Image (cartoon, grey):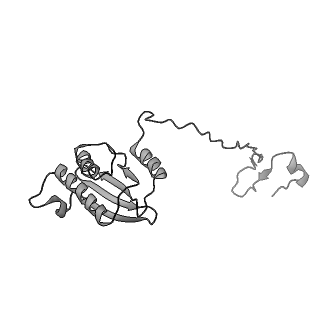
Amino acid sequence: MLRTLDCTALTSIPPQFYMPDIFGAQLRPLKLPLLQRQITLVKPLVVEAKAKARANTRKESAKTRNRRIRKKYDGTPAKPRLSVFCSAKQLYATLVDDERKRCIFSGSTSQESIRGDPPCTTIEAARRLGEEVVMTCEELDINEISSYDRNGFARGERMQAFEIAISAYGFLAR
């Protein structure tokens, strides 16, 4: 036999279901807990930005200095920017026309025409590269450069040998 409950009673008491006595077991009520609404308050996610601490306040990074220099100076076809990159073993120099976004001249100490036969030291090759830049400027009727961009690199032996060669032509004020 199956017992039924009144529908109005379901709102106030937990529902109880009775199982028929099929297998000879006694009738036992099955109690289920009432489903309760759980109200959860969601707090808004607040991300606080902290002031960026500068790791090196006294010495800025080379890239930061280089970006600042490039904002000030732009190369033109008549007055290009002389950019120098110094890797661990080689020195690279380029004359850049920023107005047209073109490279007028590019050379490095690893080129065979600058190195010579038999090969010389990188310091001697840097001096020869400076002379090659000067010869290219004479061919293109360039009397002045807008800026000398070392890309934040320190003046090592290769850089000094290169600078001596181009300062003889009058590019660098000494």
x, y percent for residue 105: 31, 63
Q: Quadrant of the N terminus?
A: bottom right
Judge whether 12 appears above or below 136 on screen: above
Of residues 64 and 23, which is closer to you in this image?
Answer: 64
x, y percent for residue 16: 79, 49
Q: Residue at x 36, y 64 (%)?
A: 103
Is residue 6 something one can see in this rendering? no
- Relative side of 99 to 36, left or right: left
Q: Residue at x 25, y 55 (%)?
A: 130
Q: Quadrant of the C terminus?
A: top left
x, y percent for residue 61: 41, 42
* Residue furthest right as drawn: 8
* Residue furthest left as drawn: 118
Q: Residue at x 86, y 53 (%)?
A: 5
Of residues 152 and 94, which is closer to you in this image?
Answer: 94
x, y percent for residue 121: 14, 51
Judge whether 23 appears above or below 31 on screen: below
Residue 131 occupies quadrant? bottom left
Judge whether 36 appears above or below 142 on screen: above
Residue 141 occupies quadrant? bottom left
Is residue 131 something one can see in this rendering? yes
